[in-house]
Image (cartoon, helix red, strand yellow):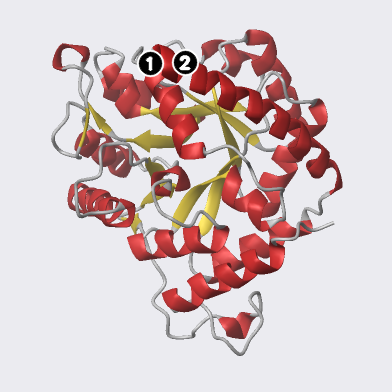
Amino acid sequence: MKPKNLNRRKFLGSAALASAGLLLPTHSLFAGPAIIKNWKKPNSKINGVQIGVITYSFRSMPDQSAEATLKYVVDSGVSAIELMGDPAESFAGRPENPVDRRTYYGLRRSKRDGQLTEDQEKELADLEAQSKSYAKQVAEWRKNMSLEDFIKLRKMYNDAGVTIYAFKPNAFKQNHTDAEIDWGMKAAKMLGANHVTVEHPSDDAHTARLGKFAKQNKIYMAYHGHEQQTPTFWDTALQQSDYNALNLDIGHYVAAGNDQPLQIIKDKHAHIKSMHMKDRQVPANSKGNLVWGNGDTPLKEALQLMKTKKYKFPGTIELEYEIPEGSNAVTEVQKCLAFCEKALG
């Protein structure tokens, strides 16, 4: 059964598309004629290098629906994405999350950086308890929902000129059931993705489990890393399954203190399915996450390497630096894309 707010969600989504110039009011949302024929579709494949964006980059924007997210992507000039689970599942009618995600993820980042106060620790614990309860509700919903909704979502994005190369639902952790893991991979294929992404669990038994499901579904499981990344970080997972792969984060790799960050790309390129891009500093410079071109991450050189070597994996813009006052996520992603265009020109 669809939730009560579905009609309102569809109305808001249609309004977002109409304001973006992506929807004609006299046609169905998913019908071919609904797309304005002379609409200029984005193209962020630059001299053979596909530049994408993870939709997490737009987390600060007011509307997190799939339709509004599509508008942000198109307005940014990006034609390929790593799609987070929330907008996709909300589109398909998932029950609303009672947890304030912005607060929750902010507290989690602060905890990771060792910056939580005692009161914040309590607040995070309460939010985590709410999240566990909600996770059970979502698991039940996933059992009964129709994956056909993801085909509709894929068509809407593709019609607007945006392809989905990766999917990142919250479905691949140790506490998720086999059914949920299988669901996440099947959903990704419906969306047109060739890989799913997940934070590396640092658990060899679990990467073996995920690799098994990836092989069964013929879709790659690409592991993302933060400052725990090293040149050998993915080796065990890669040995466990031909369908285990890398979602390298070159910015976090630099902040972790690894020297020769371009070497990991050269050494592991055959296993990299997508690479997150951000400009972080080395430990000696406080590991800051800065506007592109101001940190220590060799983003320009990495992009040029991808171009020269004709690597096929996309470079994924992940907007994590502080958005300047008066700007917004769409404007900043545009700036990151401009950086890529200049580097690859």
**Identity of the residue drawn at 41% across and 64% down:** 74
**Residue type, mark 1 in image:** Leu
Q: Which mark is residue 154?
A: none
Name the quarter where the N terminus is drawn.
bottom right
Q: Which mark is residue 116?
A: 1
**Identity of the residue drawn at 36% across and 65% down:** 75
87 and 32: which is toward the camera: 87
2 and 268: which is toward the camera: 2
Which residue matches tag 2? Answer: 121
Mark 1–mark 2 contact, CB under 8 Å?
Answer: yes
Q: Is residue 137 above or below residue 36?
A: above
Q: Position of residue 258 (x, y in %)?
A: 28, 13
Q: Position of residue 323 (x, y in %)?
A: 25, 44
**Identity of the residue drawn at 72% across and 29% down:** 133
264 and 4: which is toward the camera: 4
SS for callout 1: loop
SS for callout 2: helix
- Is residue 230 visible in the rendered image? The answer is no
Q: Quadrant of residue 256?
A: top left
In the image, taking residue 338 as reference, residue 7 lies left or right, namely right
286 and 99: which is toward the camera: 99
- Is residue 240 visible in the rendered image? The answer is yes
